[in-house]
Each structure stands twice: as C-alpha cells, then as structure tokens.
Amino acid sequence: MPEPETDQQLTPSAESKLAEYVRTGDRRIRNEVVDEHHWLAVSIVRRLRQGSVPFEDLVQVAMLGILKAAERFDPSFGVAFKSYAAVTARGEVRRHFRDSGWAVHVPRRLQDLRYEVRAATDVLTDRLHRSPTAAEVAEYLYVDVDLVIDALCADSNYRSRSLDERIGDNRTIGEVVGNEDPSYDLCDSSDAFDTMVDRLPERFAQILRMRYLEGRKQREIAAELGVSQVHVSRLLEQAHRRLRLALEAADGRDQVSASA
C-alpha cells in the first residue's frame, strides 16, 4: 500500500515554480518564491553584516539579490535555486558594502583586494604561526607590496568616526577638528607685518625682518651689516618707533572708514 503524500511532497519546489514563471510570466509566482526565501536573506546578512548599516536595510539588499536570482534562474541548469540565490544575494550585499559603505572614495581594485588580503593573512598566520608581514602577503597574492599596504590602509577608511567620540585627553574629535590652527593667526600676522614693514625705509625694514622673521640675534645682525651691536640696538629702537607710528596711522584710517 503506497504511503500517503506528505505536505512537503504536495508543495511545489522553488525550481518547479520558477519553471512555471518562465512559461507563464506570472510575477505572482516569482514573488512567492522570493518571499519564501526571506529566511535565506536574513541568514546571509547575519554572516556578512559589518559596520553600522541597519540590519533590515541589509536584508532588503539581500532580498534584491534573491529577486535578481529568481529573474535569471534557468531550471535547466540542474542547480538548486537556494544555492544560486545564496551566491547572488551574497554578491549583492558585498557590492553594497563596496559601493555605499565607505567613508571616503577608495578605488575598486583596493576594495576587492581588501578581502583577498584578509584571506591571505588568515592562511599565512596558520602556516607561519605568526602574523605575516605585508611583503609576505604580497608574495602570496602575487601583487606589489605597496598595493597590500594600500589595501590595509583602506580598511581604516571604511567607517568614519563620530565627532562625539572621545580621544586620549578627554576631548571629542569634533573639539579637536573644530579648533582653529594657530598657524592661521601666524600667517595673518606675518602678512600684516610685511605690509607695515614695506612702508619703512629699507634699512629699518631689513633689520626688522632679520630680527623677527629670521630670528637673528643683535650681534648676528651687526656682523652681517658690518656695524656695532650698539648701533643695531639704536636702529631697532628707531624702527620700532616708526613701525608704531605707521600702525597707529593705519588704525586711524580703518576707524574713519568704518564710521563713514
């Protein structure tokens, strides 16, 4: 007496449903197969998930891969749809990470090489019983060592760091990045100094530049100019007086312009 058919035997397989979809073009059949493989998308994302991308967003990316697999699947291949869909969905998730997850632009070759370097590092670590050098990884992959170093550096560019993240001295990254570089003020001061000094007689301008821009001592200036250090001191005093008068005159012109 034949055994009664089970529910599993009565349920059409994904392969037979997709064969029907190829024959009829009924998208409801295709969509049913895709929905039935939602569990596969979840399983793939759990294994591949990285960074702060929301889990459900990645599941939708994997589901898109399963949809593409359902569209491309040919029952005559003799391959289980589950296996074909898994490969397609994994590729879709990895492509999403490669194209959308980087904090800065990284060349495609380095993005792909990043995975190869990781795999090679695991193999060489087991073989050498220590972490391999970049040169050893490069030799294993038959690539230039500079490419391996660039790929390793690319890993640090995958995710951006929060401006609220605290660093060693208990300041946030935003506080450090947001601070003005004091060099900006120095540049402004240097430009203003040059502007005012250019208005002085050449002798005074030369001594002021040697003293304050080049950082020379009075005795060095005296030796350069062939005069006594006392004479240099007097010239500096006169230059300071003239420079002060020039600054006061410039400040007075600015105030008049502001009130006009």
Image (cartoon, grey):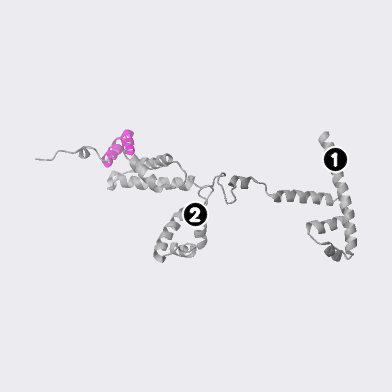
Residue at position x 49%, y 54% in the image: 110
Residue 252 image point, x, y percent? 86, 40
From this viewpoint, which residue is outermost toward the left? 1
In what element is the residue under mark 1?
A: helix
Residue closest to the eye, 138 or 247: 247
Q: How many marks?
A: 2
Residue closest to the eye, 69 or 249: 249
Amino acid type, callout 1 = Arg
92 in magenta: no
Q: Is residue 187 above or below residue 258?
A: below
Could you say which disc has been placed on residue 89 in the image? Answer: none
Residue at position x 32%, y 33% in the image: 28
In what element is the residue under mark 2?
A: helix
Q: Which region is colored magenta?
A: 14-35
25 in magenta: yes
Q: Is residue 140 left or right of residue 250?
A: left
Could you say which disc has been placed on residue 110 in the image? Answer: 2
Which residue is the site of mark 1?
253
From where the camera sits, is residue 15 visible?
A: yes
Amino acid type, callout 2 = Leu
